[in-house]
Amino acid sequence: MSNTLIQNTANVKGAVAGVAEEAESVLASVKAYLADLSESGVDELPLTVSPLVSAAERDMLLGPPPDIIDGMAGAETLDMIRLDLGDCRRCQLGNTRTNLVFGVGNPNARLVFVGEGPGRDEDLQGEPFVGEAGKLLTKIIEAMGLTRSDVYICNVVKCRPPQNRDPLPSEIEACSSFMLRQVKAINPSAIVALGKFAAQTLLGVKTPISRLRGAFQDYHGIPLMPTFHPAALLRDPALKRDVWEDMKQVMKKIGMELPAQKTGAAGVEQP
Ligand code: SF4
């Protein structure tokens, strides 16, 4: 080994020993400080974590928190919210989407349908509920005596999760305030949450959709009816009857007459 290499190795060893000594000294000081506090009768310390961003920066990134949005009813238009979203990359779904799927329908709708997130067809077309499940939703809406342009349709998250996986909590956190702002801008008489994920996310519960459906819940002052997702009806057509029962309750809630026809949601015989 050359003299230079031996000298460098010695220097490194010396530096490491110095750092270790310093760490031991800091640790000893902390221990002594805690021992002093303990002797003085202090047996716990408050843990405060400094936020990484200020409240104003958080609002700029994620939009205002729900309690502020509640007080904003009618203060924003859908166009303003869409403008605020822009070419959104607030979560990682922004990097894999084809189109941001904002929502579609009547900005003054009495009824808003909320699903989980865009699927493949929705991602490609930039419009919610346009695939097979979407066609079934359109039939349900028409069975109620309405058209897609009478109601408003949107999702909890605006960009397609890869392989249609469930959105992650961080993605919901980043996106869901925009859905709440949409609802507040429209101020409908009722909301229908389509499927387990949308219902559980909006209501903040883990109750199965089979137990949630059929009864109105409160969502920021607006009656919300959880029901099965149209995709579930494609897998199990027997669920159509339950959905139609839920839609009849919704129609009653928003002051609609039941349509005079023999069949209800997507071909289900009305009782
Ligand atoms: S999912 Fe929502 S928050 Fe995430 S990038 Fe898309 S629009 Fe933005």
Image (cartoon, rainbow, N blue to C red):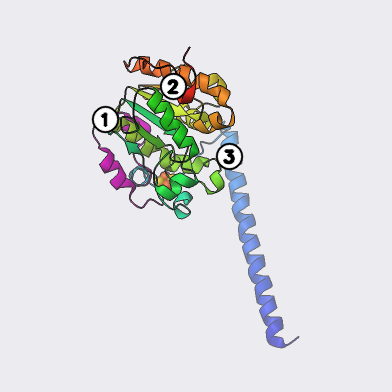
How far apart marks 3 and 1 lie (CA) works out to 65 Å
What amino acid type is highlighted by mark number 2?
A: Met
Q: Is residue 10 left or right of residue 204?
A: right
Give the residue at x 59% y 54%: 26
Residue where numbered disc 1 is placed: 108
| Percent of width and height locating residue 246 | 46, 19
Q: Nearer the viewer, residue 251 or 158?
A: 251
Circle 3 is placed at which residue position?
A: 36
Which percent across, then down, holds residue 121? Answer: 47, 46
For marks 2 and 3, give the CA distance.
58 Å
Q: Is residue 165 visible?
A: yes
Dots 2 and 1: beta carbons under 8 Å? no
How many numbered circles are shown? Answer: 3
* Residue 202 located within the stretch drawn in magenta: no
- Of residue 105 and residue 60, the one placed in the foreground of this image is 105
Instruction: Residue lying at the far front in this picture: please name it.
Output: 262
Percent coordinates x, y for residue 269 in the rendering: 49, 17
From this viewpoint, is residue 68 visible?
A: no
* Amino acid of disc 1: Asn
Q: Which residue is mark 2?
A: 225
